[in-house]
Image (spheres, helix red, strand yellow):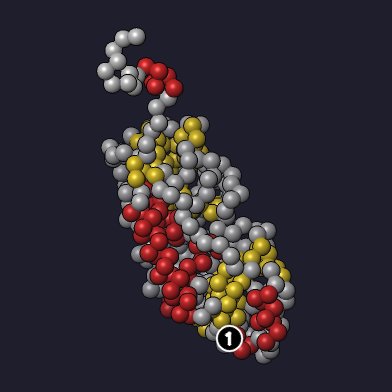
Amino acid sequence: MSHLRVERPGLSTTVQDLGRRGLQRYGVPVSGALDPLALRLANALVGNAAGTGALEILALGPTLVVEAESVRVALVGSDAGLAIDGQPVPAGRSVTAPHGARITIGGFTDAASCILAVEGGFALEPCMGSLSTYARGGFGGFEGRALKAGDRLPLLKPAATAVPERKAEPIDYGQGPIRVVLGPQEDWFEPAAIERFFAEPYRVTAETDRMGMRLDGAKLDHARGFNIVSDGIADGHIQVPGTGQPIVLLADRQTVGGYPKIGAVIGADLPRLGRMRPGSEIRFARIAPAEAEAARRAQETAFAALVQRIGPVVVMPTTEQLLQANLIDGVVAA
C-alpha cells in the first residue's frame, strides 16, 4: 500500500470532502470543507471528481513524506508555502513529488483554511457515505480526528499518472459585505437590533472553530427572549444567544438549536466566510432570497468557467538553456 506519512501534522489537518448529506434527521452533522470551492478546484487540478476527499489545513500546514512511487498534489485556497523537498511550488497548480520527497506547507495568514488534494484520493473507508472528519463525534476521515505525527494516510494510486501538470487562475471569492437573508426568527429581535446588525462591524473571535464563527460587536437585543423550541439549522444560520453576540454556524454545526436565528449567510458567501481568520472584520448586508439564489447560480457559472480554463503548466527555459539554443532560423555560424 502507498502512503503519505505524517512527519509533522500542522495545527489542524483533517480529511474533508463535500459533506455527509441526508442524515441530519438522525442528528448527524453535514461537516465537509469550510471552503468547498477550494476543494473542488484542487481536485480538478489533479484530475479527481469534485467531491473527492482531500486534506483541509488550518493556519499551519503539515510535513508529509511520500511513501509511494510518486504522488501528484495541488494546493488551493492560500499561498501557504507549499514546497517539495524545499523547492517552492505556487498555489493553484499541480506538482508531482517522487518517492521519499517531503511535502511541506508552512504557516499562512491570507486565509483560515486551504486544501491539499492528491491524485486519486485516499484509500479510506467512507463513514455514512462520506470521508469528512467530524472530530467532535470522532468519526469519518482518518480515525475520526486531525492528523498526528506518525500517521500513514493510504493512497488509492501507487504512482502519479504521466500527464502534464496543470494550473488554474485564482478563485474569485467576491468582495464587500457578507450577504444575509433575514429569518427564520427575525421577529424575535428588536427592530433596532436588526438595523444595528447591518450597520455595525463585527470581528471574528479566537473562539471560532469548524462548528461556528463567533463574532464580537454590537449587541443584538432580543424582543421575545433568547430561547426558542429547538428547530433545524442550515449552513450559515446566524444564532444569537443571550449574550447578544451572533454566531455563524459552519460546516460542523449541530443539526438543531434553541437560540433565535436572525438570518442566514447566503450560500455564495459561505466559502469566503470559511476563509476568514480570527481578527477579521465583517460587515453584513441584507438581500432578498431571490438575489441570494441568483448569486449562487452566478457563482456556479463562474466556477465552471474557471475549471474550463485550467491549462498546462508552461515551464520557461532557464538563461543557460536560452544561451545554448539557436533562436534565429537559418543562422548556423557567426
Closer to us: 107 or 1 = 107
Q: In the displayed structure, would residue 260 be above or below residue 246? A: below
Q: Is residue 230 visible?
A: no
Instruction: Name the residue tied to disc 1.
Output: 185
Closer to us: 46 or 166 = 166
Q: Position of residue 3 (x, y in %)?
A: 38, 41
**Left or right of 334, for residue 249:** right
Mark 1 Cα-neighbour bin, 10 Å: few <14, some 14–19, many ≥20: some
Q: In the displayed structure, would residue 200 be above or below residue 3? A: below
Q: Report helix, strand or loop for mark 1.
A: loop
**Left or right of 307, for residue 287:** right
Name the residue at 56% across, 81% down. Answer: 182
Work out which quarter of the rendered image holds the C terminus and state it. Answer: top left
Work out which quarter of the rendered image holds the N terminus and state it. Answer: top left
Quadrant for residue 52, please give it. bottom left
**Left or right of 142, for residue 213:** right
Q: Is residue 183 visible?
A: yes
Total marks in image: 1
Q: Position of residue 333 (x, y in %)?
A: 31, 9
Q: Position of residue 168 (x, y in %)?
A: 40, 48
Name the residue at 57% across, 68% down. Answer: 178
Q: Position of residue 89 (x, y in %)?
A: 47, 38
> What residue type is disc 1 on?
Gln
Quadrant for residue 201, please give it. bottom right
Closer to us: 235 or 10 = 235
